[in-house]
Amino acid sequence: MAPRRFSLNAWMRGFLCAAVLLLGAGPCCSRHMVGDSLWKRNATYNVSMTTEIAVTTPPVNTEPELPGDLVNPVDPPNESKETIISFSVFFILLLLFFSILLVHLMIKYQFRYLPESIAFVLIGFIVGLLLFISELFSGVALRWQEKFSPQSFFLLLLPPIIFESGYSLHKGNFFENLGSIVLFAVMGTAISALIVGGGLFGLGKIGIVYELDLIQSFAFGCLISAVDPVATLAIFHGMDVNPTLNMLVFGESVLNDAVSIVMTKTVLNQATDNSDSAGMILAWSGLQFLMMFVGSAVLGILTGLLSALFLKFVNLRQNQSLEFAMWFIFAFSPYFLAEGLHLSGIMAVLFSGILMSHYTHFNLSPITQVTVQQALRTVAFMAETVVFLYLGMQVFTINNTFKVELIIWSIVLILIGRAANIFPLSFLVNRCRNVRINFRMQFVMWFSGLRGAIAFALALNLLEVEQFSAEVTGIIITTTLVIVLFTIVFLGGSTLPLLKFLKADRQSEVDDVTLSKTEEQGIAVATTGDEPEPQLTSKTKQIFSYVDYRYCKPFLTRRFTKKEVRAAQVDMQRRTHEWYQGLREASSSEE
């Protein structure tokens, strides 16, 4: 049959499918992503794409559908990959446009009762509802379970969010609380996973919830124990909470992810090899985490130090484009190298961001310093927005795999597991701390254990585990999604009233509190340097501060001459004058 040309219907089908696929067009067009096992188990169509679009007849699906309508959707048979990807990129940019406009209106009209992250989830929910209704009337096959790609999340969206948080981190606060953070992240996650996994296994045995076997129960307990730094950063950043409380929750959420990933992989390995004893499993998990923690931290630190030395001795300050490009390479290379070495990219890029902000930043030209800060905040904001839009759109993947009793008991066990690690461990660390974690802070830490896209991405990775049946996988994915949305919307939305009630935020006596992370970042730009780093009091910390000031900074940062300082001032004045003249000319032309 002769190739068919594009028609209006073809354009409409392409746009509709692109809208639903969103950023998942990549995994939808590739069988090498997370849904590869589903493709093999439930292939519906086998479409041959060429540069010229030809009419094809899909073969009949002879395999049964997966439970919960988690069938494998397909690309439109009459559209090319390039067309679908182009529409998908356009559509996500369109969603970002409306999201940015919403944030602008919230700031302009001082609507300070809804966190931005929850607003983005609601936008995703509304868009998902409209697309779901459109799909019902159009009859176009869609890939609902693949539109959120764990690979896209871990490799594209997460790195700028974590690096920006490390780059803007108060380093004194972080290292002051590092011992407590590690204890909460390691022991706390293990306690939570044991309570959730063991509780669900026992409840399943007596018939109260959907029955999962031992491996499935503890795999779910491990992945759902991942406290998400993206959700935590988005909720806490605009609230100006107590610095110690903020650092404990944020630091735990970052390190906790590495623990959850190691524990989940260890449990899944037992699905194929259950010959090891419980002691061997525990010892091997601890060794894996230790190697991951030390290796990731060393990799991030070495990259940060190398970037400082390189930009100190290689003079790229006269060409800001090359300077920014080199900074960008050093900023994100440790994440991908760590992931390639089976380490924690999150921890590597966090430590790299801390070191680069402490040393490398001061080897940059003034123009590049401003560019770096603004570009980093912008990219991190857009990545966070896409993550929450994704989560809101996932609601309509829920169908027959919705197990109410499993969801309710999972939430109850998560809260119990969170309490069982926060309060006892706080009692232990208070015996060794100068600044005690009071009960109010402990209660907020218990309440703010937000789950997010990391837990959901780990659940989607179960699609690759052949030992998990399609039914169990669908149930775990659905349960994880509901818990993620519950913690973000309910717990995240209730955080501000709780902080006000407990007076745990520093603005508790001020009525003008903002929940906008974007507005708070704008204020931070105007007041950079006004808030000093916490003073280090212990003898060890004073020694570290002295060594850093006396030896590390002179070795790793460049001492600018008076001539260079003057030249930078003249350059900044010239650029500011050009910008001001452009504004005046624009105002004159309008008049």
Image (spheres, helix red, strand yellow):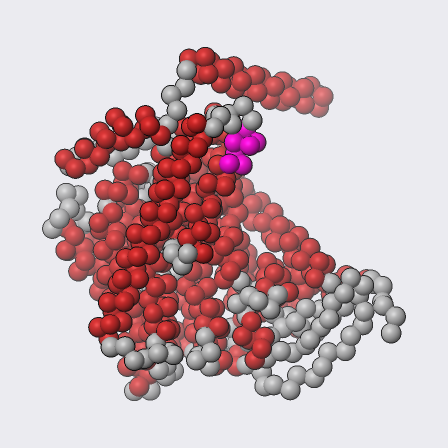
Is 202 positioned to the left or the right of 110 in the image?
left
Q: Residue at x 78, y 62 (%)?
A: 51
Q: Is residue 421 above or below residue 311?
A: below
Question: In the rendered image, is residue 461 in sight?
Answer: yes
Is 306 positioned to the left or the right of 171 in the image?
right
Q: Residue at x 36, y 42 (%)?
A: 302
Nearer to the camera, 432 or 489: 432
Q: Quadrant of the N terminus?
A: bottom right
Is 216 positioned to the left or the right of 141 in the image?
left
Q: Position of residue 514 (x, y in %)?
A: 41, 42
Q: Is residue 50 above or below residue 97?
A: below
Q: Position of residue 224 (x, y in %)?
A: 36, 66
Q: Residue at x 70, y 84 (%)?
A: 60
Quarter of the view holding residue 21:
bottom right
Magenta-drawn stretch, dominant element (helix, strand or loop): helix
Q: Is residue 18 above or below residue 317?
A: below
In the rendered image, the residue lying farthest to the right is 2
How many dots with numbers? 0
Magenta-colored span: 320-326
